[in-house]
Image: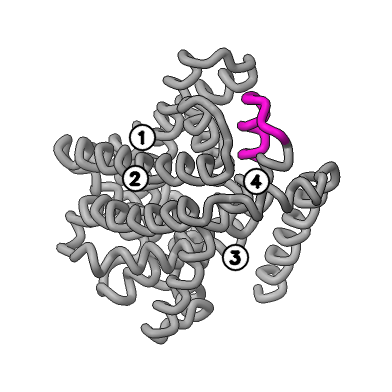
């Protein structure tokens, strides 16, 4: 098991190296350095502070989704979210989402699968919000057909996931189906069905339309904060693009990050930003400067703060990860 885990990490960093090779191979390093050094430090710092502030809103949203499990304070939830992001920044395949649920389960004495279900629902709302923003954006800018196909495809995908979450919240049919399958399956599959049952019970986080509206509204607020960071960093490097350009950057980067196999989406994020800005005739070196600093603004503070909090709480990530599915 340890060998398999280490192999995944090695492969993910090899992917990062390969992606950065393709990104940097045609870079004029002298011009790139010029863009980096001339970036407005005050605007970069402001972007950093705005991004950190967004975790209060993320905690408010998670508080709503966990209401059926228990009552939690925003100041309790925010550091757990940051810790999950920190783990995502150093480990591949978004393992931080599972670790975040495991930490919450350990600290708050709640069901880990049910907590992970709330994180899953969160990601559905994130994806749906981003896909909808992108779908609206294509009406205001003449994108290529492949971009339009991506927008509609992503919207349909997250709409179906949202529908699944709603059915699980308002109907007992999915849970009954899992129990039916369990009765027809061999004993060794009991672990899977235990987890599936708890997961579906956790989807009850969307048990009212009021909660759905609150979650969607807070999701819009989360992405408004994110958009503000993109606007600030773009301005810091003198990127002159219309407002819709920042919307495209936001959507491209985050849709790519949802299933990124690399730690923190390294390489995926930068490639998405470079690709998005290409449509607006921004010089390649300027695009790379924006992509690197924009990503650093997000991953450096969360990684440092997250792991300091994990250390202060004396949490052993490896142990927590191994115990996650034992509940």
Q: Residues within 10 Å of mark 2 (few under 14, many from 20)?
A: many
Q: CA distance from mark 3 to mark 2?
A: 24 Å
Q: CA distance from mark 4 to mark 3?
A: 18 Å
Nearest-to-viewer mark from 4 and 3? 4
Write down the residue under mark 2.
222
Of all residues, the one furthest to the right in this rendering is: 25
Nearest-to-viewer mark from 1 and 3? 3
Q: Residue at x 24, y 67 (%)?
A: 75
Nearest-to-viewer mark from 2 and 1? 2
Q: Residue at x 65, y 47 (%)?
A: 289
Which label's residue is closer to the chain start, 2 or 4?
2
- Is 267 situated left or right of 141 in this image? right
User: Which image quarter is the N terminus in?
Assistant: bottom right
Local secondary structure at mark 4: helix
Write down the residue under mark 4.
270
- Is 265 situated left or right of 105 in this image? right
Q: Is 23 or 50 nearer to us in this picture?
A: 50
Write down the residue under mark 3.
91
Residue 119 appears in the picture as rendered? yes
| Residue 212 point in image, percent of width and height | 22, 38
Q: Is residue 280 magenta?
A: yes
- Is 74 situated left or right of 91 in this image? left
Above or below for 47 versus 82: above
In the image, the segment drawn in magenta is 271-283
Q: Residue at x 44, y 52 (%)?
A: 47
């Amino acid at each position: 098991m340890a060998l398999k885990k280490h192999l995944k990490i090695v492969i993910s960093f090899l992917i990062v190296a390969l992606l950065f090779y393709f990104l940097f191979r045609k870079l004029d390093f002298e011009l790139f350095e010029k863009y980096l050094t001339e970036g407005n430090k005050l605007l970069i710092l402001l972007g950093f502070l705005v991004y950190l502030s967004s975790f209060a809103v993320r905690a408010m949203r998670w508080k709503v989704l966990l209401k059926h499990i228990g009552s939690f304070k925003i100041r309790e939830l925010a550091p757990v979210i940051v810790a999950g992001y920190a783990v995502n920044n150093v480990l591949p395949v978004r393992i931080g989402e599972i670790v975040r649920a495991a930490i919450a389960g350990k600290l708050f004495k709640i069901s880990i699968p049910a907590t992970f279900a709330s994180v899953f629902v969160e990601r559905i709302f994130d994806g749906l919000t981003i896909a909808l923003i992108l779908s609206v954006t294509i009406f205001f800018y003449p994108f290529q057909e492949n971009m339009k196909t991506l927008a509609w495809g992503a919207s349909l995908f997250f709409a179906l996931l949202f529908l699944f979450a709603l059915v699980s919240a308002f109907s007992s049919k999915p849970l009954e189906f899992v129990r039916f399958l369990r009765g027809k399956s061999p004993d060794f599959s009991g672990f899977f069905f235990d987890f599936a049952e708890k997961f579906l019970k956790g989807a009850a986080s969307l048990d009212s339309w009021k909660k759905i509206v609150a979650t969607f509204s807070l999701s819009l607020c989360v992405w408004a904060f994110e958009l503000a960071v993109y606007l600030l960093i773009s301005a810091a490097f003198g990127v002159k693009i219309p407002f819709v350009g920042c919307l495209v950057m936001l959507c491209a980067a985050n849709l790519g990050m949802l299933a990124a196999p690399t730690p923190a989406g390294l390489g995926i994020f930068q490639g998405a930003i470079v690709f998005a800005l290409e449509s607006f005739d921004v010089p390649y070196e300027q695009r790379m400067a924006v992509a690197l600093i924009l990503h650093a603004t997000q991953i450096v503070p969360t990684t440092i703060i997250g792991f300091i909090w994990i250390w202060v709480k004396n949490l052993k990530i490896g142990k927590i990860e191994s115990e996650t599915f034992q509940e």
